[in-house]
Amino acid sequence: MAGELILPFQMDDATQSAMIHGSDETLDSLTYADAIRTFEAGLGDNMRVSVMK
């Protein structure tokens, strides 16, 4: 057993919030999924990007 070891460190607010809430930028963007779908539905065919899987 190593005993009680305290090592202070700093992190930016966004990283701290992500760790506390268990989220990241990808999960955060899902909050806006409906707005993204609405925006994409209004795009013309010449504005769409096709992704090959």
Image: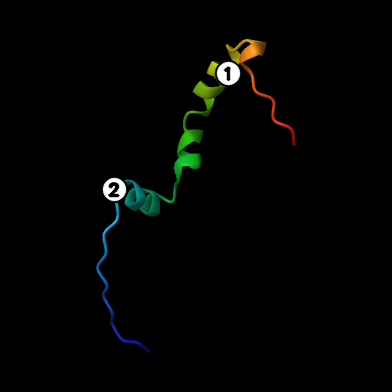
Indicate how the structure is coloured in the image. rainbow
The N terminus: image quadrant:
bottom left
Q: Is residue 40 above or below residue 27?
A: above
The foreground one among 53 and 4 is 53
Q: Residue furthest bottom?
A: 1
* Residue 36 in picture, x, y percent from top left: 53, 23
CA separation in Å, label 2 and label 1 = 31 Å
Q: Residue at x 48, y 28 (%)?
A: 32
- Disc 2: which residue: 13
- Disc 1: which residue: 40
Element at label 1: helix
The amino acid type, in three-letter code, at marker 2 is Asp
Element at label 2: helix
The C terminus: image quadrant:
top right
* Residue 44 in picture, x, y percent from top left: 62, 10
Q: Is residue 10 left or right of residue 36?
A: left
* Residue 8 in picture, x, y percent from top left: 24, 68
Q: Are marks 2 and 1 in contact (CB under 8 Å)?
A: no
Quarter location, residue 10: bottom left
